[in-house]
Amino acid sequence: MRSDARYKLYFAIQPPPEVADQALGLLQSLRPAERFTAKAMPPARLHVSLNWVGGFGRPPTGIVDKAREVGAAVKVRPFDISFNRIGTWRSGDPPPLVLWGDEGVIGVEALLYKTLHRAMVAPGMAPRRETPLEPHLTLLRDHAVMPEAFIEPITWKVREFVLLQSHYGEGRLDVLARFPLSA
């Protein structure tokens, strides 16, 4: 990624509002036992990252149009996603507290991620080789550490994916396009 990247562009899945509330409610039930002091992600910023498009120093208008075309061409049927674990991942500073899953995330990788990757290769938006993906939902970033724990699954039917643009340092995430899933 470019060191001057102010705009980060990627495809993602966003949970519906009631699922975002459920995930953040789980987080609230942990406090103060885990001693988290950071604020949770706002519900509208919760997402499961999929395919990276790029980092840019200025608004990437041309590549956004190309990414919209790629996203619109992807045909995947709706599928369920389910997260059954919570814990701190030892990456980043501060490290993220995330939800992730076992078999409940197979559709994310096997269906959507791989199909989207193939669609991005043709116009030169991605290398032929896929990078590994571990679908997860970041709830917050904090120096307090929570060991991995199993939770009652947080599940929803994925009916769309989105093209997101984050604005580095602003705490802003814009949805630039929505792509419905269909059989």
Image: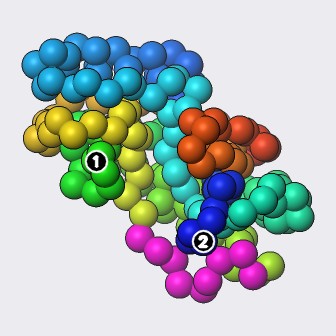
Amino acid type, callout 2: Arg
Can residue 2 be spotted in the picture? Answer: yes
Q: Residue at x 71, y 38 (%)?
A: 174
Tag 2 residue: 2
Q: Residue at x 80, y 55 (%)?
A: 59
Q: Residues within 10 Å of mark 1 (few under 14, many from 20)?
A: some
Residue 21 position within the rendered picture, expressed as x and y whole percent measured from the top left: 45, 16
Residue 131 position within the rendered picture, expressed as x and y whole percent measured from the top left: 47, 74
Amino acid type, callout 1: Pro
Can residue 101 be spotted in the picture? Answer: no
Instruction: Give the magenta part as a residue range.
Output: 124-132
Q: Residues within 10 Å of mark 2 (few under 14, many from 20)?
A: few
Q: Mark 1–mark 2 contact, CB under 8 Å?
A: no
Look at the numbered disc 2 and give the secondary structure of its residue: loop
Tag 1 residue: 95
Q: Please indicate whether residue 25 sits to the left or right of residue 52 in the image.
A: left
In which image quadrant can residue 181 be found? Answer: top right
Q: Residue at x 87, y 58 (%)?
A: 61
Q: Which mark is drawn over residue 51?
A: none
Report the Cα–Cα distance between label 1 and label 2. Answer: 21 Å
Q: Relative to the observer, which residue lies in front, 46 or 100? A: 46
Q: Please indicate whether residue 180 sits to the left or right of residue 36 in the image.
A: right
In which image quadrant can residue 90 be found? Answer: bottom left
Task: Determine whether 1 is above or below 108 in the image.
Answer: below
Task: Determine whether 54 is above or below 159 in the image.
Answer: below
